Image (cartoon, grey):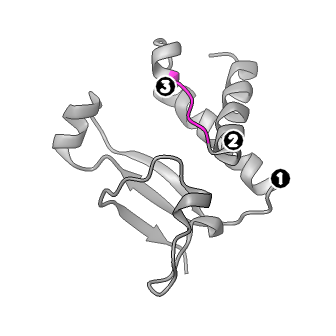
Amino acid sequence: MKDQQIENLGRELYDSLRDRRTVSPISERFPEISIDDAYAISRNMLHRRISVDAEKVVGKKIGVTSKAVQRMLNVHQPDFGYLTDAMVYSNEDTVPISSTLIQPRAEGEIALHKA
């Protein structure tokens, strides 16, 4: 995938997050996408969250750790991402679902928090 495509897709994901709207899966639109491309798009989106919204990375996450979920999604390994301070809620906090989430779902995941 070319650098310009990675930048455009990072911007698309960032904009959809800020506008709270869904987009069609990138893997369906670009079946040739590699894991390296996907992580580059993720880093591009993260860069926007940091540079535009002044978010700070506070940890990393590991997702799709369950073999059942991997089979369901047709992937063969966990995925990795970043947690920013805008994603952190304490046990006592109320999560403002209607103003922050697009299609809320719950799934147990492993998260590492940088102290």
Q: CA distance from mark 3 to mark 2?
A: 14 Å
Q: Is residue 44 visible?
A: no
Q: Nearer the viewer, residue 18 or 97?
A: 97
Looking at the image, residue 61 sits to the left or right of residue 10; the answer is left
Looking at the image, residue 48 sits to the left or right of residue 1; the answer is right
Q: Name the residue beneath numbered marker 3.
A: 25
Q: Quadrant of residue 19?
A: top right
Three-letter amino acid code of the residue under disc 1: Val
- Whether 25 is among the magenta residues is yes
Q: Tag 2 or tag 3, which sits nearer the N-term?
A: 2
Dot 2 falls on a residue whose secondary structure is helix
Most common SS among magenta residues:
loop
Taking the spot 65% from the left edge, 38% from the top edge, the residue there is 16
- Percent x, y of residue 95: 52, 71
Q: Where 38 falls versus 81 (above or below)?
A: above
Q: Nearer the viewer, residue 9 or 17?
A: 17
Q: Name the residue beneath numbered marker 2.
A: 14
Taking the spot 74% from the left edge, 28% from the top edge, the residue there is 7
